[in-house]
Image: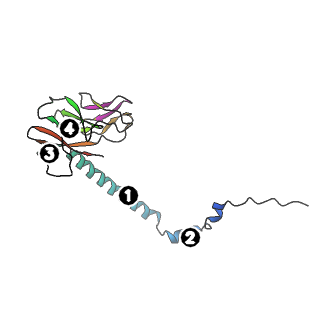
Amino acid sequence: MVKEMDQPARTPTESALPPRTSEEEWRKEFPYPWNEDEIVTRRDTLRFLLAGSGALFLATGAIAILGTLPKNPNLKAIPIAKEGELAEHQWKVFNYPDEYTQGILINLPGHGLVAYSDVCTHLSCAVLYQGDGKLHCPCHEGFFDAATGNVLAGPPTRPLPLIQLARQDGTIYALKEIAR
Ligand code: FES
């Protein structure tokens, strides 16, 4: 007598799953033809791109140094330099927003004073200004554009956070870090 082969036991997870539905039933639950799916995807992509370019525009605009210190109690304004302290291409690091974190302030020809967090967005080494319009991270040869903070080369994928600046009574203040 031939012994019947044992059927493999269903795992508890399999038995807990609802039975599979046919494609027709699936179509009833999700009645979207493929062409419409593509239109939605394109529309969403367009929205995403518009939102992204708007955010980039705002971020770039934030580089411009503010005329005076805004009267906003939520902003932590910290004096970081005297006006005229840095000649073109000169730079300095400063503590912001506390003594454990630093930013880098650069007098960039054609842009004036710009400031970024000096923490590389790859693995957090400190970036340095090279004097040629680029910020350099020596840990893994990451490079950022000093005019925008955007990545130029190397392993970082995200731009450096901007630090918004203000000027009042001959002093430059760091106002706010803007992550991007
Ligand atoms: S930590 Fe800056 S490139 Fe790796």
Q: Nearer the viewer, mark 1 or mark 3?
A: 3
Sequence-earlier tag: 1 or 4:
1
In contact (CB < 8 Å): disc 1 and disc 4: no
Circle 2: is it few (<14), some (14-19), or many (20+) Cα within 10 Å?
Answer: few
Residue 87: quarter of image: top left
The x and y percentages for residue 135 are 28, 32
**Label 2 amino acid?**
Glu
Sequence-earlier tag: 4 or 3:
3
- For label 3, the residue is 66
Q: Is residue 128 magenta?
A: no
Sequence-earlier tag: 2 or 1:
2
- Picture residue at 72% right of the left edge, 60% below the top: 9
Secondary structure at numbered mark 1:
helix
Secondary structure at numbered mark 4:
strand
Q: Give the spatial CA distance, label 3 vs label 2.
A: 61 Å
Please give the count of numbered marks on the rendered protein: 4
Which labelled disc corresponds to residue 42? 1
Residue 171: quarter of image: top left
The x and y percentages for residue 11 are 67, 59
- For label 2, the residue is 24
**Label 1 amino acid?**
Arg
Residue 80 in view of the camera:
yes
Residue 128: quarter of image: top left
Q: Give the spatial CA distance, label 2 vs label 4.
A: 60 Å
Circle 4: is it few (<14), some (14-19), or many (20+) Cα within 10 Å?
Answer: many
Q: Give the spatial CA distance, label 2 vs label 1.
A: 26 Å
Q: Nearer the viewer, mark 2 or mark 4?
A: 4
